[in-house]
Image (cartoon, rainbow, N blue to C red):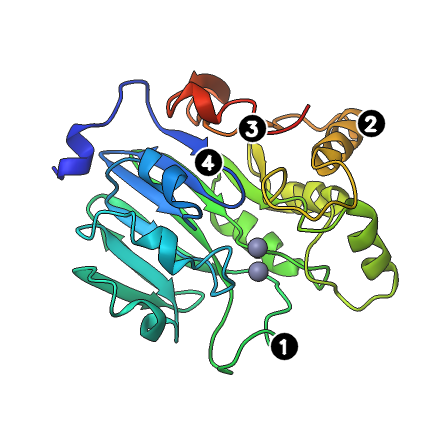
Amino acid sequence: MTSAARSLPAGGPSVTWLGHATAVAELGASRVLFDPLLRSRTRRAGAVDAVLITHTHVDHLNRWSLKAVDRRAHLVVPRGARYIVEDLGFANVSELAAGAQLEIGDLQITAVPTRHDFGRWSKRAELEAIGYVVSAGGATLHHAGDVDFSDHAVFDDIGRRFDLAASLLPIGGMMPVWYYRARRAKLDRGVHIDPDCALDIYERLGARALVPVHWGTLHLPFGLPSMPRRRLEKIALAKGASGVHILAHGERMNLARGELAGSSIGAELQNAVEP
Ligand SMILES: [Zn+2]
Ligand SMILES: [Zn+2]
């Protein structure tokens, strides 16, 4: 058992949203942190056994935030990204390409494909954007990373392959919902999906819960930061979609029971999202 595991709170497998794409999950005897952003929030995740990075955009692979992580954690980055983190002092760094697997403690980690218009941002052609499926203790969690409007059949495949307790899916970006929808209308794939598309991907995955991320944290002042959340609530209601769990920053969801478990991280992160 690791040092991180000894500090596990009781209550079963869970995931806590820490804002943007950052989340910490408790699975089996281990704790895993996704895409840590902002040092104060990274510290609030506490000791973790693994840190999983979905791609090298600065809001996902953030060196300044990674410096707030205990270097005993095993850091996992997409193939080709090791050079960005190798001076940070992590004892273990692994690169994964989509389809590759890794065990860290009792965590079964699979890098899975996503769709993110990455090439035009990337300086190195071999860099890829990935998502992760992580299983331990009978619970399986999916983090999609960032997603654009291109072909989403990859999510059908992930849904066929894994029995997902929950999926963390992006529903916004720095710009308002209408901007991404306009991009979609031009069929240029855009950079980020809208809440409608996230709900469609949720159905493709067949996950029992959708936890929306990548909203209400970083945004430009062209609309209410709550816009993606409001749209998701509206369409989930209209479609009768169940299992949509909108968390506040710092709020935890129990993956076994599919219900909110209250704040595990600290009340001060609560209400960071505008109503
Ligand atoms: Zn990105
Ligand atoms: Zn992003």
Mark 2 residue element: helix
Q: According to the image, label 2 marks what residue?
A: 238
- Asked if the residue at label 4 sits under 8 Å from ligand 2, the reply is no
**Relative to 273, does residue 206 appear above or below in the rendering?**
below
Q: According to the image, label 4 marks what residue?
A: 18
Measured from the top left, where is residue 254 in percent x and y? Answer: 43, 23
Left or right of 92? Residue 116 is right
Estimate the spatial distance between the alpha carbons at disc 4 and disc 3, rounded to whole Å. Answer: 10 Å
Name the quadrant containing residue 28.
top left
Of the two numbered discs 3 and 1 in the rendering, the one whose residue sits closer to the viewer: 3
The amino acid type found where label 2 is placed reads Ala
Q: According to the image, label 3 marks what residue?
A: 272
Pick out the residue farthest to the front: 221
The amino acid type found where label 3 is placed reads Ala
Mark 1 residue element: loop
Structural crowding at the residue carrying mark 4, measured as other residues with C-alpha within 10 Å and reported as few (<14), some (14–19) or many (≥20): many
Measured from the top left, where is residue 273 in percent x and y? Answer: 61, 29
